[in-house]
Image: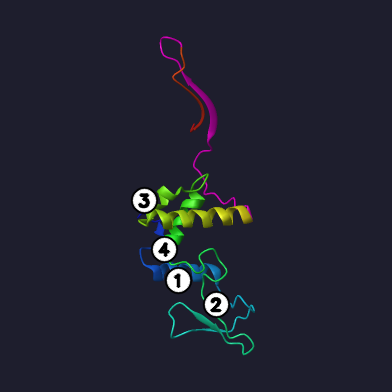
Amino acid sequence: MRFPIHYGQPIFTYDPRSARRFLEEQRWPDGPVCPACRSRKAYANRSKQGFYRCARASCGKDFTVTTGTLMERSHVPLHKWLAALFMEAASREGPTPTDLQRELEVTYKTAWILCQRLRDIRRRTRLRIRLPRSRPPVPAARAVFPAGGIPVRSAISTIRR
């Protein structure tokens, strides 16, 4: 599995704990926030790794960094979710289940569910995040005519300058 690089450093590694730390830094730069009551008073739950508990007496709920996200209640490791999100952002139409199966080394059923969740969130939020490209694509009509004059391939494709 290949992982994305950001400014020369890998965003995360094969370790799900480093992926969790990365998500926590991105979602909660000033410390954990309870998604139920928005309280900043939370502490790590020692009995469950990666869980936090709200310190307010009226709330007291357990939560993780994935609570309220498309990764919630998923048994897929976080580092594979991050790789799938990177593949979603890096491609024009998003990855296919076969792409995810091959790159993330998961079953086709898991890859299909990942694709469905990614497409659902893209539809609901109209997510249009794309990575910058070195050169913009240029649409061009291409037709290849052999000596006989009958087109072999005629299609509209995207080529790079």
Mark nearest the camera among 2 and 3 is 3
Image quadrant assignment for residue 104: bottom left
In magenta stretch: residue 112: no
* 38 up-or-down from 138: above or below: below
Residue in the image at 46% along x and 10% along y = 149
Region in magenta: 125-149
Disc 4 crowd rating (10 Å Cα; few below 14, some 14-19, many 20+) is many
Q: Earlier in the sequence, mark 4 or mark 3?
A: 4
> Callout 1, which amino acid?
Arg
Tag 4 residue = 79
Question: What type is the residue that disc 4 sits on?
Answer: His
Counting residues from the N terminus, which is met first, the one under dot 2 or under dot 1? Answer: 1
Residue that numbered label 2 is attached to: 32
Q: Earlier in the sequence, mark 1 or mark 4?
A: 1
Name the secondary structure under disc 3.
helix
Q: Position of residue 60 (x, y in %)?
A: 58, 86
Dot placed on the residue nearer the N-terminal end, 1 or 3? 1
Residue on which disc 1 sits: 21
The residue tagged 3 is: 102
The nearer-to-camera label among 4 and 3 is 3
Query: Label 2 vs label 1: CA separation?
Result: 12 Å
Secondary structure at badge 1 equals helix
**Percent coordinates x, y for residue 78 in the rendering:** 44, 65
Marks 2 and 1: CB-CB under 8 Å? no
Q: Measuring 42% from the left and 58% from the top, which residue is drawn there?
A: 110
Q: For marks 1 and 3, give the CA distance.
A: 26 Å
| Mark positioned earlier in the residue sequence (2 or 4) | 2
Judging from the image, what secondary structure is the residue with disc 4 in? helix
Q: Is residue 7 visible?
A: no
Residue 143 painted magenta: yes
